[in-house]
Structure formats: structure tokens, C-alpha cells
Amino acid sequence: MKKKLIIVSIILLPIVAFIFHILFSTGFFKTIDHKMNGKIFATVPIAGVEDLSVDEDDNFAIFISYDRAAERDGKPHQNAIHIMDFNPILLP
């Protein structure tokens, strides 16, 4: 009986160690603090933003919206490509 327990332990220990290593290295056990030091200049009421690209040189962002929840529920929705200008003259 002890021999079987030792063999099972030898087989399971590397598997458990590997799974723990994967979870630890991918940040599964990390705590993330929810804080932001910046200021919110504008909020945009667009549902389903999927992709975002910011051009820091020209101060604008391009984002794509696709409202999957409205699509799933059969409600009317508008999918689009949006451009947001971060020009300091336009900001309050």
C-alpha cells in the first residue's frame, strides 16, 4: 500500500507543480489595485468597443464598436468605426 502511494505521489507531484507554475507565471494569484491617477476628459456612450488604437503623435484614437449583446438579443444596433480627437483645444 505504501509503495502505491509513493508511486502515485511521484507521478502527481510534477503535474501539480507544473499546473501551479503555469497559474503563478500567468498572474492568476496577483492582486490588482483599481486606481487611476489621471483625469477623465470625456465619456462616450458606445456599447461594445472591441478594438482601440491610440496615435499619440497626432492625438487621436480609433476604435471599433460591435454590440454583441444587442445582436444576441435581436435588438437594433449600430456597428461602426469611430475616431476620437484628443486635441487640447477641444478639451474642457
Image: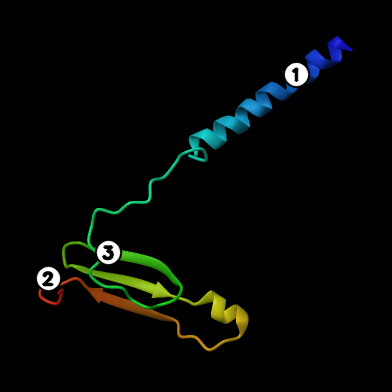
Q: Residue at 61%, 29% (x, y): give it.
A: 18
Q: Is residue 88 left or right of residue 74?
A: left
Q: Is residue 59 left or right of residue 17?
A: left
Examine the image and state in which quarter residue 52 appears. Answer: bottom left
The residue identified by callout 3 is: 54
Q: Count of labels shown? A: 3
Quarter of the image where the C terminus is located: bottom left
Q: Which of the two discs, 1 and 2, labels the residue nearer the N terminus?
A: 1
Q: Amino acid at mark 3?
A: Val
Q: Position of residue 89 (x, y in %)?
A: 10, 75
The residue identified by callout 2 is: 88
62 relative to 5, above or below: below
Give the mark toward the camera: 2 or 3.
2
Residue extending farthest to the right is 1
Q: Which of the two discs, 3 and 1, labels the residue nearer the N terminus?
A: 1
Kindly state the secondary structure of the residue where label 3 is placed.
Answer: strand
Give the mark toward the camera: 3 or 1.
1
Q: Amino acid at mark 2?
A: Pro
Q: Which of the two discs, 2 and 3, labels the residue nearer the N terminus?
A: 3
The residue identified by callout 1 is: 9
Q: Amino acid at mark 1?
A: Ser
Kindly state the secondary structure of the residue where label 1 is placed.
Answer: helix
Classed neighbour count for the residue bearing mark 1: other residues with Cα under 10 Å, few (<14), some (14–19), many (≥20): few
Cα distance, mark 3 to mark 1?
51 Å
Cα distance, mark 1 to mark 2?
63 Å
